[in-house]
Amino acid sequence: DDILKLLSLVPKAANEKEESTKQKSILNQQKEILPDQNGDWDEMEEETEESTNVPHSEESSAREKQNQAASRRLQKEFNERSLKPSYQSMFKQRCTLPIFAYREQILQTVANNAVTVLHAETGAGKTTQLPQFLLEEALKTGNGGDTSIICTQPRRVAATSVAERVAEEMDSQL
């Protein structure tokens, strides 16, 4: 009886070129079943790399620089916060949750797969710990500026409670 089960549904592409080839294949299949942007069923025009990369690369480069600066700032803030006694005390409590024993396995599975399903018993720490695992890993590796973690809850009260709990555990304010 495992407390936690990880299912990897969609492995990530081995590299960007493979991913790009898959995306083009999907687009080609969609041409046959979806209308173009104008609602016409005629063949969609393919954008050339030249037409998409020139203005996009300047914008992309500026965004990348912003993300790198944000990542460095967030990493520094996290390193400082993680030294605080209040953070360390809460971290010790987090380590006692059942899901913590699976932290590395979860991080590795998420890193290697585009879609991961995590199934665990109530109270294992799925809702509060998994987002923190992902955020901490992103901050430690200097990718905090590129990271977005979105969690949903069926009710607003539950979402607010979870957000407050995670903020408390991360020694942060909402």
Image (cartoon, rainbow, N blue to C red):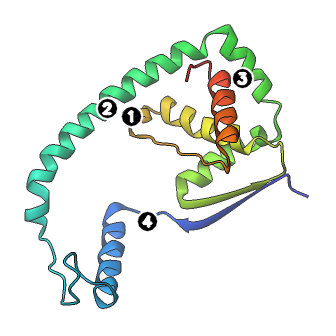
Q: Amino acid at mark 1?
A: Gly
* Residue drawn where x is 34% and y is 89% of the image: 33
* Front-lying residue, 86 or 167: 167
Q: Mark 3 vs mark 2: which is more N-terminal? A: 2
Where does label 2 land, which residue?
68
Is residue 157 left or right of 148 when viewed as pictured? right
* Front-lying residue, 103 or 128: 128
Query: In the rendered image, which quarter contains the C terminus?
Result: top right
Is residue 54 left or right of 74 when viewed as pictured? left
- Outermost residue, top side: 85
Alpha-carbon neighbours of circle 1 within 10 Å: few (<14), some, or many (≥20)? many
Q: Which mark is residue 145?
A: 1
**Camera-side mark, 2 or 1:** 1
Q: In whole angstroms, how far apart are the C-alphas of marks 3 and 1?
A: 23 Å
Q: Mark 4 vs mark 1: which is more N-terminal? A: 4
Q: Quadrant of residue 145 in the image?
A: top left
Q: Which mark is residue 91?
A: 3
Where does label 4 land, which residue?
13
Disc 3 and disc 1 in contact, CB within 8 angstroms: no
Q: Mark 2 vs mark 1: which is more N-terminal? A: 2
* Front-lying residue, 105 or 98: 98
Query: In the rendered image, which quarter contains the N terminus?
Result: bottom right
Secondary structure beneath dot 3 equals helix
Q: In whole angstroms, how far apart are the C-alphas of marks 4 and 3?
A: 34 Å
Alpha-carbon neighbours of circle 4 within 10 Å: few (<14), some, or many (≥20)? some
* Residue drawn where x is 19% and y is 37% of the image: 62
